[in-house]
Image: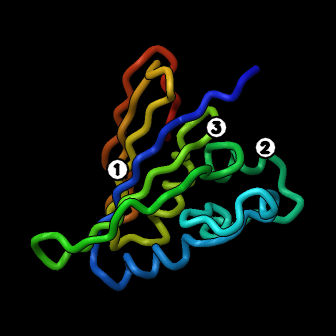
């Protein structure tokens, strides 16, 4: 069966210091894929580390997707009108959006707001989720095979 890729667009906003900390900590190399990818601007394992012997089942349990973020790019980091700063990323995940990962990350960085929008290549479903103050505050998904969140 061919992999179904999910396109993900992430906007992270908040004060400069915690945002810079998140952006810095998000960089890393996936131990299981280091030969193929090199350093990524959004390495799930850098933030929610798995054991070197972890399997895809561990990735699904901890991150909500197999393999983490692929083709990750930081699209921009910019100030907004007030003291808030914004960083934008795009990345792909196989089969499902990484909702479990962001449940964990939001609690690690409660001063930040994380907004994730996602859709597979075939647009069979699309969704939005937002975490603020460490909690899930928005969870919308439309379509015939929408993934489940918490």
Q: Residue at x 41, y 18 (%)?
A: 143
Q: Residue at x 64, y 37 (%)?
A: 94
User: From the viewer's perspective, is the residue at label 3 or at label 1 nearer?
Assistant: 3
Q: Counting residues from the N terminus, which is met first, the one under dot 3 or under dot 1?
A: 3
**Secondary-structure class at tag 1:** strand
Q: Residue at x 31, y 44 (%)?
A: 138
Location of the N terminus by quadrant is: top right
**Secondary-structure class at tag 2:** helix
Q: How far across and how far down the image is residue 131, in percent? A: 36, 55
Query: Would you name the residue on which mark 3 appears?
Result: 94
Q: Nearer the viewer, residue 76 or 136?
A: 76
**Secondary-structure class at tag 3:** strand
Circles 2 and 1: CB distance less than 8 Å? Answer: no
Q: Counting residues from the N terminus, which is met first, the one under dot 2 or under dot 1?
A: 2
Q: How far across and how far down the image is residue 79, in percent? A: 21, 74
Query: Would you name the residue on which mark 2 appears?
Result: 57
Circles 3 and 1: CB distance less than 8 Å? Answer: no
Among the 4 quarters of the image, the one containing residue 25:
bottom right
Q: Using the image, determine if residue 92 lies above or below residue 112.
A: above
Query: Badge 3 local density, few (<14 within 10 Å), some, or many (20+)?
Result: some
Left/right placement of residue 27 relative to residue 32 reads left
Q: How far across and how far down the image is residue 95, in percent? A: 62, 32
In the picture, the disc for residue 60 is none
Q: Nearer the viewer, residue 97 or 35?
A: 35
Query: Badge 1 local density, few (<14 within 10 Å), some, or many (20+)?
Result: many
Outermost residue to the left? 81
Q: Using the image, determine if residue 33 lies above or below residue 98.
A: below
Query: Would you name the residue on which mark 1 appears?
Result: 130
Q: Residue at x 60, y 69 (%)?
A: 47
């Amino acid at each position: 069966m061919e992999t179904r890729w999910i396109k993900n667009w992430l906007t992270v906003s908040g004060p400069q210091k915690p945002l810079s900390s998140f952006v810095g900590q998000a960089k890393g190399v996936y131990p299981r894929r280091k030969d193929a990818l090199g350093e990524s601007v959004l390495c799930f394992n850098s933030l929610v580390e798995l054991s070197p012997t972890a399997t895809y089942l561990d990735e699904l349990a901890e991150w909500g997707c197999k393999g983490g973020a692929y083709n990750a790019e930081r699209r921009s980091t910019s100030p907004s009108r007030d003291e808030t700063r914004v960083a934008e990323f795009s990345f792909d995940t196989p089969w499902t959006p990484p909702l479990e990962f962001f449940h964990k990350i939001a609690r690690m960085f409660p001063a930040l707001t994380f907004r994730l929008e996602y859709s597979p290549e075939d647009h069979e479903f699309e969704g939005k989720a937002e975490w603020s103050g460490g909690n899930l505050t928005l969870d919308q998904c439309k379509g015939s095979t929408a993934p489940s969140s918490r």
